[in-house]
Image: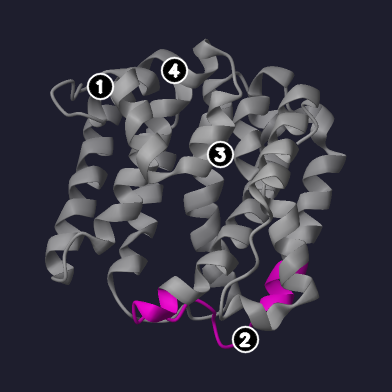
Amino acid sequence: MSLDACARLVEKGDPDRFLATMSANPEARDRLWPLYAYNLEIARAPWASREPMIAEMRLQWWVDTLDAIAAGKSHHAHEVAGPLSTLIQERGLDAGALRAMAEARFWDVWQEPFADTPALLAYLDATSGNLMMEAARALGADARSEPAIRDLALASGIASWLRAVPVLVARGRYPLPADSEPVDLARRGMEALARARRARATVPRAAAPAMLAAWQAGPTLRAALHAPEKVWTGLPVPAEFTRRGALVLRSMTGLW
């Protein structure tokens, strides 16, 4: 599958991340499309069938595929795994971290609640955290940048999770653990966002396009802090002009 086709998958299935990526230069975009297409594939897998075992099989295929890629085997015949395996090999990405993203998604298959807040945060780090870290690594980030990247990814992950609560509840899931309220999670997200921004200098400017995926984290978290009860019914969405204007400003300044 071509990189253009990966981009079309992201455009259709993850339009906000697509917009953020389109603000990057063509070379950076080509490194991000396979990662974001892969993320979309594993995010959809738990919901692709009403039979939990079939959903688990889809995820297990990705777990096994990442193991094979880590062992040096290519998967060029697969529409997403092919470009992903090429990217991993060319940019020295951590196939184990990408594998952990698929493993974490097994939670989405079943209807068990998270045991506690640390379990939810671990899930968000395995999904949002690993995705942003490998995206940034593909653009030149290294271990020095990791604390800031994971903090920003945590803020973004919490924001996205809070926004998804009504949909998850409608699908029979228990998105928030019993020991956590929306306002507590929103506060954790804002603290993580502040830490990431204080450490912005540790992230190379070339990796900024990967960080732009978090462009809506701040407004979403502030909305949840202001009106936490709306997390259950749907947080307000800023006007399209406001959203896109914020993205343009961040992409121009690099001040994610």
Kind of residue at disc 4: Asp
Q: Secondary structure at mark 1?
A: loop
Q: CA distance from mark 2 to mark 1?
A: 43 Å
Position of the C terminus by quadrant: top right
Residue 113 is a magenta residue: no
Q: CA distance from mark 2 to mark 4?
A: 41 Å
Q: Quadrant of residue 251?
A: top right
x%, y% of residue 58?
18, 52
Looking at the image, the residue that sits furthest to the right is: 198
x%, y% of residue 240?
64, 47
Magenta span: 168-187
Q: Which mark is residue 72?
A: 1
Marks 3 and 2 close (CB-CB < 8 Å)? no
Residue 183 is a magenta residue: yes
Q: Closer to the N terminus: mark 3 or mark 4?
A: 4
Looking at the image, the residue that sits furthest to the bottom is: 178
Could one spot residue 11 in this view of the protein? yes
Residue at 78 percent across and 64 percent down: it is 222
Marks 3 and 1 close (CB-CB < 8 Å)? no
